[in-house]
Image: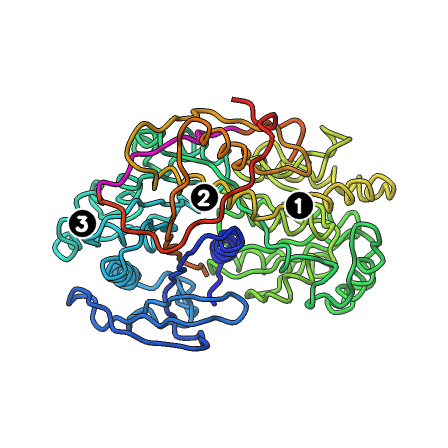
């Protein structure tokens, strides 16, 4: 429906994971005017005059399921965020997404959901603009984007602006951080980083929320990302038979007009932004060329970054290629046919493409930041469990060094097959992350009274068990201590954007302040989670 980066894929995956566990949810995204819905109904929403006409389209989206689309005239654009002609953000993005939030607020006040879960700044003002105030969860997918707006918005937003005030601006993300009952990040390490070195100017505000700040890594939709059943790949394959991957590799080289290349194919699929370290990736071009390999970059984003990539390709077109724009089929075929996947992010809240790459036997080269630290194990440092190659710092020298190590491993065919087998056997299902979300929802919806806090639940991760903690075991533990499993009707408000034995991850999995508003009667009982051995959890 709308996908610019990992946010769209992450929210779609979480919604599917919650539904599979019996959570009754409603997913709400902006209506960009390009999505057809089966069984569609349209209703006008009661929003402030400054929003203009506002409506909700409800129906079933092909490939996703039930969805509600909030529309205003300003939201209808050919790209969710940026003007395609300039590559710059739409000048009225504040109007567009405050209008979206006002529409969501109108739905909250009309439908009275028991709990609202907002994602990033685009819908962060929703619950602040609503009169009904159910318990609220905020997920920060990327702290670099706040949605800063002029102080002039204070007059339109009224009392809701109070919590959004920062020096010189209105900041909807800060408003949600200050008021949400639980604030989530998309990996345990990113949670730690934003409270120390990656706070993007609001470290104090995040530290003040530390007792309700959680880190839960994203999952991967293995129905969409499965090399054995991927309709976008010319040839299917799995970890036991890589003949199909070899065939995909040859076809990719043929399509790119580079069949003469004898070295590794190194792919980069990302938004063209400074965060993604495109300039660091280009530093590896000479090492890849020395091995007679091919570096292929694919994605859209900032014009200046795209031009930098195209400039490098013009200097050495035999070994560097840029595939402009973003195309889902191209992304799948690069994953299915490449040998290595380059992801030199300066920071990375979680990342999904490294999970996709490993699932397709395309070994990642990553920087040791955020969710990349939580998901990729260096094969040189940990020979028996390694699934990729990790640059110690997000610098050109470190990324080049990691790339050279990866190329050396690729030349050792026996060792390479072992690394591929480990990477492909790791499962990144949404089931465990969704379970952890449900546990937080349950704690927020529990009747008022003493709630037992598990301040630091840690789980040792193995290549086959890669989520933080074990929500089923935690549920069993909390139930023994008197915490009940309430019935829930959960509203998900989202904005689509466009494993290792060495690692012990931890994050607080305790209670957060309950919402002050009384809970409405529930309409469906959430499916009970199966209990799991408590031995898998170490307090």
SS for tag 3? helix
Packing grade of label 3 (10 A; few <14, some 14-19, many >=20) is some
Packing grade of label 1 (10 A; few <14, some 14-19, many >=20) is many
Q: Name the residue under label 2.
A: 438
SS for tag 2? helix
Q: Do the residues labelled 2 and 1 touch (CB within 8 Å)?
A: no
Residue 510 appears in view = yes
Of residues 518 and 356, which is closer to you in this image? 518
| Residue pictured at 27% horizontal, 54% vertical | 126
Tell me if 217 is positioned left or right of 31 in this view: right
Quadrant in the rendering for residue 334: bottom right
Which mark sits nearer the N-terminus, 3 or 1?
Answer: 3
For discs 2 and 1, the disc positioned in front in the rendered view: 2
Q: Mark 1 points at which residue?
A: 427
Distance CA(mark 3)–CA(mark 1): 42 Å
Residue 92 appears in view = no
């Amino acid at each position: 429906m709308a996908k610019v980066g990992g946010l769209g894929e992450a929210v779609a995956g979480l919604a599917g994971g919650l539904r599979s566990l019996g959570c009754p949810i409603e997913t709400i995204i902006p209506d960009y005017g390009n999505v057809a819905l089966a069984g569609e109904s349209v209703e006008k929403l009661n929003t402030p005059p400054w929003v203009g006409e506002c409506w909700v389209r409800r129906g079933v989206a092909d490939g996703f399921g039930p969805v509600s689309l909030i529309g205003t005239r300003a939201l209808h654009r050919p790209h969710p965020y940026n003007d395609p002609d300039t590559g710059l953000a739409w000048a009225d993005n504040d109007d567009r997404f405050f209008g979206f939030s006002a529409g969501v607020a109108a739905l909250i006040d009309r439908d009275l959901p028991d709990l609202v879960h907002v994602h990033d700044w685009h819908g962060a003002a929703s619950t602040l603009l609503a009169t009904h105030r159910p318990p609220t969860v905020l997920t920060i997918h990327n702290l670099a984007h706040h949605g800063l707006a002029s102080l002039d918005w204070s007059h339109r937003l009224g009392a809701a602006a109070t919590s959004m005030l920062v020096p010189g601006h209105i900041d909807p993300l800060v408003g949600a951080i200050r008021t949400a009952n639980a604030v989530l990040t998309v990996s345990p390490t990113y949670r730690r980083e934003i409270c120390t070195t990656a706070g993007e100017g609001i470290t104090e505000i995040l530290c003040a929320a530390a007792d309700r700040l959680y880190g839960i890594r994203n999952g991967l939709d293995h129905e969409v990302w499965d090399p054995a059943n991927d309709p976008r790949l010319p040839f299917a394959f799995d970890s036991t038979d890589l003949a199909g991957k070899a065939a995909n590799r040859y076809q990719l080289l043929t399509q790119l007009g580079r069949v003469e290349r004898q070295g590794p194919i190194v792919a980069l699929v990302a938004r063209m932004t400074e965060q993604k370290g495109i300039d660091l990736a280009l530093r590896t071009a000479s090492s890849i060329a020395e091995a007679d390999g091919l570096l292929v970059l694919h994605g859209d984003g900032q014009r200046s970054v795209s031009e930098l990539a195209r400039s490098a390709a013009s200097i050495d077109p035999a070994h560097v290629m840029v595939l402009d724009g973003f195309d889902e089929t191209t992304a799948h075929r690069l994953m299915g046919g490449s040998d290595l996947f380059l992801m030199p992010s300066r920071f990375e809240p979680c990342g999904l493409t490294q999970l996709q790459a490993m699932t397709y036997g395309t070994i990642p080269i990553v920087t040791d930041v955020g969710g990349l630290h939580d998901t990729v194990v260096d094969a040189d440092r940990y020979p028996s469990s390694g699934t990729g190659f990790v640059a110690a710092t997000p610098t050109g020298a470190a990324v080049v060094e990691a790339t050279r190590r990866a190329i050396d491993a690729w030349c050792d065919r026996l060792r390479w097959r072992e690394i591929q087998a480990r990477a492909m056997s790791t499962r990144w299902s949404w089931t465990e992350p969704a379970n952890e979300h449900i546990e937080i929802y349950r704690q927020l919806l529990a009747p008022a009274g003493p709630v037992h806090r598990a301040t630091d639940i840690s789980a040792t991760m193995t290549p086959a068990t890669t989520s933080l903690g074990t929500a089923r075991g935690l549920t069993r533990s909390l139930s023994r201590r008197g915490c009940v499993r309430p019935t829930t009707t959960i509203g998900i408000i989202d904005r689509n954007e466009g494993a290792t034995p060495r690692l012990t991850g931890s994050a607080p999995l305790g209670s957060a302040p309950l919402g002050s508003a009384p809970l409405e009667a529930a309409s469906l009982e959430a499916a009970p989670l199966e209990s799991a051995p408590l031995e898998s959890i170490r307090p």
